[in-house]
């Protein structure tokens, strides 16, 4: 029998401790059983019943060594087959301890990478009024959407590789690319250059980081999984909130280049500390990875539950970036005499509210179910645009909208990984999270440009209603899409799901 390789130790150990099935006899493997010796016929054992097949009554012409070798080969094949993944309830979860340091590290990385998306409205307002006044708002909206949109398909590829080779090396690579992109943006003087440094390069950096930053907490938490993931995404909101208040003042006093240089080196320091806090944890009983990477999981792709969640994510994301990118422009259009610092405050308030909302909605999801929390948060996000944003024209009203939308608007992102774990389990979670988040690509890429195009067609200073209705209603469509997964998972109306 061939010597077992170390890579099959876990499977071999499971095979050794498992009871041997009766079907592993030579007859079950396709060879006739050797005839009983005379000594067997005189033992106290009952004689087996003869088969009516004459072929089975003939003694085997194969030598015993060949039969043993084939039996061994069949057993080795059985040992190589993946063991079904255990359910979450069968795994011992730390629910804290070292896991909180991992959450802190992920939050720090999210604060200076994904948090930049929440600061984009400040940069867009500065570009529109100071650096590129002749550029269309739709073009600047597209500039802000490229990184946030194209990072999602990149995250699927990196998630597959990370599930096989480990998370840490990919996180470090993503942090390096993100730092280089921010540093390069400081030296840009044309819009096309910003498309590279604030569009293409961040898409690669953030796309590499996204599946792992969102999946690390799920290795350490089950009961508090949504809360832990919410804290990570809340780190991005908090980073965006602090940066929103500081960067606008820095742009006024220090200029674009010096502001972005300082911002990039702060990025580098925070990301370095965050990487030191990360640690992966192997899930007990996880099935062995196949030798070849399966890029398309057809079992998942054929599941209606997946498509219900995916369509919900896509529609929700179409309505998410527009308030972030256009809130400052809206405030300036409705209240012309606002100072530059006052224009930036609603975005900062939105981001602070988002940090609180993502944390509390995550905790709520641990109690009432991830899908229920998704339906609640997205519904209130869409309704806040339809019922509040389009009707406010005072600074206090704008601040009120910023609080409500900030609290509920970004929760769907932090719920993506817990929802994938709830529907399909925690194994290969980086891949599953990436598969769900890739459906944010259309919304993150086209949502803000479509909003800007509707706004430009209807008159920016006079009529925002059409653009806001589009943004709010498409999030309500996202709620309708997730209802299939909700009632398929738990048919009762008030069930935890």
Image: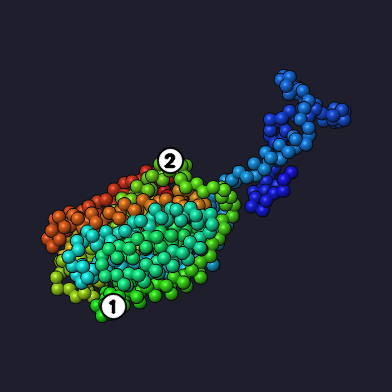
- Residue 79 horizontal/vertical position (percent): 65, 44
Q: Secondary structure at mark 2?
A: loop
Q: On screen, 284 above or below 350?
A: above
The single residue placed furthest to the bottom in the displayed view is 253
Number of other residues with Cα within 10 Å of mark 1, as a class: few under 14, some 14 to 19, many 20 or more: some
Q: Nearer the viewer, residue 93 or 36?
A: 36
Q: Is residue 69 visible?
A: yes
Q: Secondary structure at mark 1?
A: helix
The part of the image, by quadrant, that contains residue 94 is bottom right
Q: Which residue is mark 2?
A: 302
The part of the image, by quadrant, that contains residue 78 is top right
- Residue 138 horizontal/vertical position (percent): 22, 59
The N terminus, quarter of image: top right
Colour mode? rainbow
Measured in 3D between alpha carbons, the distance from the residue under mark 1 to the one under mark 2, in whole angstroms, is 51 Å
Nearest to viewer (mark 1 / mark 2): 1
Q: Nearer the viewer, residue 378 or 112?
A: 112
- Which callout, 1 or 2, points at the residue further toward the start of the chain? 1
Number of other residues with Cα within 10 Å of mark 2, as a class: few under 14, some 14 to 19, many 20 or more: few
For image coordinates 54% across by 47% down, the residue present is 292
- Residue 470 horizontal/vertical position (percent): 22, 52
Q: Are marks 1 and 2 in contact (CB under 8 Å)?
A: no
Q: Which mark is residue 250?
A: 1
For image coordinates 67% across by 53% down, the residue present is 6
Number of marks present in the image shown: 2
For image coordinates 21% across by 53% down, the residue present is 469
Q: On screen, 266 above or below 38?
A: below
For image coordinates 46% across by 45% down, the residue present is 296
Q: On screen, 476 above or below 40?
A: below
- Residue 251 horizontal/vertical position (percent): 27, 76
Q: Which mark is residue 155?
A: none
Q: Is residue 370 visible?
A: no
């Amino acid at each position: 029998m061939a010597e077992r390789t170390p890579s099959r130790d876990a499977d071999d150990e499971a095979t050794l401790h498992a009871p041997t099935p009766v079907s592993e006899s030579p007859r079950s493997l396709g060879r006739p059983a050797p005839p009983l010796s005379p000594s067997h016929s005189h033992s106290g054992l009952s004689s087996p019943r003869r088969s009516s097949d004459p072929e089975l009554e003939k003694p085997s012409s194969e030598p015993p060594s060949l039969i043993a070798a084939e039996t061994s080969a069949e057993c080795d094949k059985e040992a190589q087959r993946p063991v079904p993944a255990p359910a979450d309830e069968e795994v011992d979860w730390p629910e804290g301890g070292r896991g909180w340091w991992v959450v802190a590290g992920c939050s720090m990385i999210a604060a200076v990478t994904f948090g930049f998306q929440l600061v984009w409205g400040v940069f867009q307002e500065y570009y529109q009024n100071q650096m590129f006044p002749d550029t269309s708002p739709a073009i600047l909206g597209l500039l802000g959407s490229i990184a946030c949109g194209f990072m999602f398909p990149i995250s699927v590829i990196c998630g597959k590789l990370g599930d096989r080779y480990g998370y840490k090396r990919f996180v470090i690579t993503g942090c390096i690319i993100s730092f280089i992109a921010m540093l390069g943006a400081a030296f840009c003087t044309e819009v096309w250059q910003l498309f590279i440094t604030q569009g293409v390069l961040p898409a690669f950096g953030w796309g590499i980081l996204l599946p792992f930053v969102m999946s690390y907490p799920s290795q350490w938490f089950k009961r508090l999984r949504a809360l832990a993931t919410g804290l990570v995404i809340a780190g991005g909101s908090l980073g965006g909130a602090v940066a929103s208040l500081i960067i606008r003042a820095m742009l006024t006093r220090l200029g674009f280049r010096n502001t972005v240089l300082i911002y990039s080196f702060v990025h580098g320091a925070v990301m370095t500390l965050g990487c030191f806090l990360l640690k992966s944890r192997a899930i007990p009983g996880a099935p062995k990875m196949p030798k070849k990477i399966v890029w398309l999981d057809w079992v998942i792709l054929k599941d209606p539950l997946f498509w219900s969640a995916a369509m919900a994510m896509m529609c929700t994301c179409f309505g998410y970036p527009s308030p972030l990118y256009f809130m400052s422009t809206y405030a300036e259009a409705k209240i012309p005499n606002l100072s530059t610092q006052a224009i930036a405050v609603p975005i900062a308030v939105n981001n602070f509210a988002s940090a609180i909302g993502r944390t509390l909605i995550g905790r709520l999801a641990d109690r009432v179910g991830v899908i229920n929390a998704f339906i609640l948060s997205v519904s209130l996000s869409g309704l806040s645009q339809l019922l509040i944003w389009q009707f406010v024209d005072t600074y206090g009203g704008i601040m009120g909208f910023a609080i409500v939308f900030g609290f509920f608007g970004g929760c769907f992102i932090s719920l993506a990984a817990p929802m994938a774990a709830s529907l399909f389990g925690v194994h290969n979670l980086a891949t599953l999270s990436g598969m769900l988040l890739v459906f944010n690509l259309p919304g993150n890429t086209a949502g803000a440009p479509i909003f800007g195009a509707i706004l430009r067609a209807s008159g920016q200073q006079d009529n925002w209603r059409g653009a806001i209705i589009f943004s709010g209603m498409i999030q309500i469509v996202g709620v309708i899409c997730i209802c299939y997964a909700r009632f398929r998972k738990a048919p009762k109306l008030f069930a935890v799901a």
